[in-house]
Image (cartoon, grey):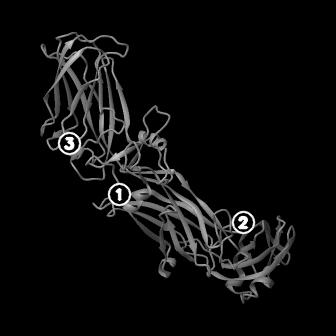
Amino acid sequence: MFLRNHRNLLSLVLLLVILPLLTNCALFVSADGRLRLFRIYFAKEVVAEIYTVPPLLTGEPHVSYQQSVYRSANRHFFLRLTLLNGAKFSATGAEPELTFDLNAGGLVAVNRLLGAAAEQTYAEWIVNVLDDFTETGDGPPRWNIDLTGVAIDAGQVLQNGGSVDVMVSTRDSAAGVPFDSALTGKFMVGVPGVAYIREALVTTSALVNMDEEEKEFVPNGTDTPTVDNGADAGEIGPGLYFEEEPGEDTPEYVCVFAPDGNPYFLSADDSLDLVFRSNLSAISQVVIGPSDAPQAFQLSDEERASNSLTLTVPGDVVTDWSTVTIPSTSPILPGVRIPIAGFLPISFEVVGDQPIRTRILTVELRIRLENGQEYQLLPPTEITRWLVDGSVLVAPWVNGNDSALGSMISLINHSPRDGRVKVRVLALPRVGPAIEAQDLGSVPVGILRANGAASINVAEQVLQPLGLRPYTENGGNVSLEITIAGADVSGLVNVSGSGMSYGVSELIKSQLGVVD
């Protein structure tokens, strides 16, 4: 479960929701015994070899081992915890602690034989059984190993996305013979330090008001005449990892730690890049982030003239968006900063004095780290569309040569609203690299009445007012884009001449323009 940046409203109830995010329990079972591990996730982006095991905020042990037999008094045994996958202890940290769960009666004395010595791959204890273990209804004896503060040299295993596994084994102290099979499981895992939840991505759209010289949006929902609101570029969670265990119905979101044992957060020297691609004309600024801590970016004329724009948010700002600090008055974890997922709201403001072209805007998300690493969170993905408030009808080909061929456009208004009609003429586009439709000009041709029909003579009402003479290349074969403001319109086109016709074709309907 993720929270939408209610940083100042955290309560004890909320803590009970967040705490399960901070640990992930993995249960390994064998016929001879039972091993339960609380798996610890470390950010693989951080270049380090020594990792400090953090405490479990739930208060439970990192390792819980339940043997398969009840041993009687004086049947002492050794219990060993071994690091696998090339890992070894570092002498810079704390010592592992073994305790008896007291679930099976009996009386024991535990002594550490070998602790977390440098270069050592295991820690070992001798358990002196002073009184018989007995059946109490909770199974055979259970042993807990607390690794809080223990420093482990993992080499480059976690940086490479691997894991440090641990093995728990026992053997009789007199005969040296194992009385349970050794049990193994993953304990430390290297994972990406920043979670991204694409399912939270919300795309939006804005309608260009054709009755206001195409310089404003239609106010609708959260949109204002000059701002397209409502998009969310997903959720980002530095210090969180999305874990989906095989066979589990509900995925888990767990805390990711830095090598020092603290939650992993982005710093001011890291950054989140948002790359926008589209026609950027008429955009005055882009605002990213929650309303209580937004980042506003003013666009220059040069940026508006381009088709790509990269905006950079400092890593510590992203961390502020996606963490919560528990109040100092809380009875649990006072003052502790906890990762949650931060939404990425995005809004676009237009200048208000330039025509707004229709477009599809995409966004790409990239993480750049201080150590030079870069990776993509989200490939280029649609975030908003700017559409005509009304209908855009396209005639891919007409001929306006009034001596030999002529073209007629027929329009039908299906809505109870009048609509202003404007026709844009495009040089007939050709297939090929870098070939774009050439805009030859636009002309208003009148009002299409509500629920009415009308026709347009292409040569007389469109080409001649634009000075596009018949018999010329551009006056002969062209494409038309017909915009009807605020109305739901369909139409037909007919190209014909004396004694012949190219037939009647349906106009192609869209809310995006040909050139845009």
Left or right of 507 in this view: 104: left
Residue 290's label in the rendered image is none
User: The disc labelled 2 sits on which kind of residue?
Assistant: Ile
Q: Give coordinates of residue 332: x percent, y percent.
A: 39, 42
Residue at numbered disc 1: 266
Report the front residue among 351 and 326.
326
Report the front residue among 59 and 359.
59
Q: Give coordinates of residue 129: x percent, y percent.
A: 19, 15
Q: Secondary structure at mark 1?
A: loop
Q: How many marks?
A: 3
Left or right of 145 in this view: 485: right
Q: Give coordinates of residue 494: x percent, y percent.
A: 80, 72
Left or right of 217 in this view: 368: left
Look at 63% across and 71% down and name the residue there. 358
The CA span between labels 3 and 1 is 23 Å
Lower sequence index among marks 3 and 2: 3
User: The disc labelled 1 sits on which kind of residue?
Assistant: Leu
Q: Secondary structure at mark 2?
A: strand
Residue at numbered disc 3: 151
